[in-house]
Image (cartoon, helix red, strand yellow):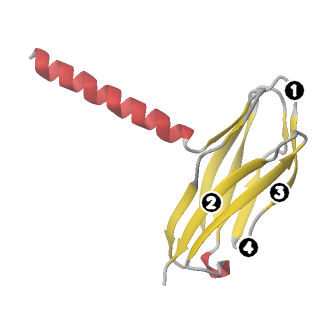
Amino acid sequence: MKICKSILILLLFISLSSSASSQNDNLIRITNTQIITPELIDFGTLTAQEKYIKLIIKNDRPNTVDICNINTPQGFLVSINNTHLKPKSQTQIFIGVDPKLLTDTLVKEKIILETNLILPIVINVQARKQK
């Protein structure tokens, strides 16, 4: 009985920790000292339809962060709810890819969000176009 209870608690802990880490996979944090982005946003293998991924940009700084310009490579689209992030606020950003506009089978690119900070926010994206 104790073994079953221990295994159940362990499985619950593993489940919660993996879901917490997967939630952070789509989180961009702006702190006082750094910008923390996901290592790679992978769209996987695409068919003929556009695909979108939702990310959250969280401003943990005590001052406002303004997103001034968004540079996207060919085939990628970006939509952001709010470009003016007040202190301790967050906003949603949607990154999409249109496989019809991709020129190669495997595309690795960078989306650059220019801000009023010294460094831009750089998001690495990858997509594979189905042959």
> Which of marks 4 and 1 precedes in the sequence?
1
- How far apart in space, not on screen, are marks 3 and 2 (Cα)? 14 Å
Is disc 2 placed on a helix, strand or loop? strand
* Vertical order, 71 against 56 (above or below): below
Place of residue 49 in the rendered image (x, y in percent of width and height, measured from the top left): 56, 74
Judged from the image, the secondary structure of the residue bearing numbered disc 1 is loop
Question: Compared with residue 129, is residue 62 higher up or lower down, i.e. above or below?
Answer: above
Q: Which amino acid does label 4 sit on?
A: Gln
Q: Mark 1 points at which residue?
A: 63
Badge 3 element:
strand
Q: Name the residue under label 2.
A: 125
Q: Do the residues labelled 3 and 1 touch (CB within 8 Å)?
A: no
N-term mark: 3 or 2: 3
Q: In this view, does 28 lie to the left or right of 40?
A: right
Instruction: Tell me the residue that label 3 is attached to.
Output: 70
Please, what secondary structure does the residue beneath circle 4 have? loop
Q: Residue 38 carries which label?
A: none
Q: In this view, does 33 lie to the left or right of 103?
A: right
What is the spatial separation of the Cα atoms under label 4 and label 3, in whole angstroms?
13 Å
Q: What residue type is labelled 1?
A: Asn
Q: How crowded is mark 2: few (under 14 residues within 10 Å), some or many (20 or more)?
A: many
Q: Mark 4 points at which residue?
A: 74
